[in-house]
Image (spheres, rainbow, N blue to C red):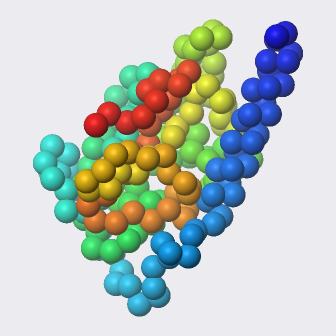
Amino acid sequence: MTLTKMRTAAASSLAAAGLLFTLAACSTPAATQPSTSAPAATATASSSAASGPCAGVKVIVDSGALKQAAADSSVCVPVDAPTLASKVLDEAKVKTEGTDAYPKELVCRVNGVPAADFDIAHKGGTYREECKKMPAAFAYWSLWVKPASGAWAYAQEGLATLKVSPGQSLELLYTVDGAPAAPAA
């Protein structure tokens, strides 16, 4: 396969993934939508739950292969009802940035990582994330959810529509060349 064909295939795959991510962010299955009478969540970040059980939502940021401590964190955010993931991240003091083209639909940087001047080593060489359109298909932040007693699952919605409940964990994980493939247990 020529380099041009590989780039075209990668761009097509990336565009399709972006479209799916955007479409998923715009839809919520009827069974998971809370009633309008649900109590409002109370949220104040608590770092004490990083090592112990969390009665609210445990928020984890893992820069994965980048090994950027500036982004990494584990915080318990107290909530008493299903709460938007974006609100939970705000309460956990996790700052996300989208791209110029998709400012709310995608996550390009978390707590400033990867910085615009940071060289991301990958199988094809090095890459710098500019956050213009879509992040690279080989280097990106992924969003994961874990129930209180279960396995991690790739989020089917974006931060703007995904709701997390007490006892769940929410993780932003940076993946380069498919590694890590999923959050650690």
Could you say which is closer to the camera, residue 185 or residue 61? Answer: 185
Can you see residue 115?
Answer: no
Q: Please indicate whether residue 75 sits to the left or right of residue 17 in the image.
A: left
Q: Nearer the viewer, residue 14 or 150?
A: 150
Task: Write the residue at 34% across / 84% down.
Answer: 39
Q: Residue furthest bottom?
A: 37
Residue 145 percent across, percent down from the top left = 40, 51
Is residue 93 left or right of 109 when viewed as pictured? Answer: left
Q: Is residue 107 left or right of residue 41?
A: right
Q: Position of residue 60 (x, y in %)?
A: 33, 44
Q: Residue at x 38, y 85 (%)?
A: 38
If the image is split into quadrants, where does the C terminus sit?
top left
Q: Position of residue 176 (x, y in %)?
A: 53, 23
Foreground: 11 or 146?
Answer: 146
On screen, residue 145 above or below 35 = above
Residue 13, horizontal then vertical, whole percent: 74, 34
Place residue 65 in its image quadrant: top left
x 79%, y 18%: residue: 6
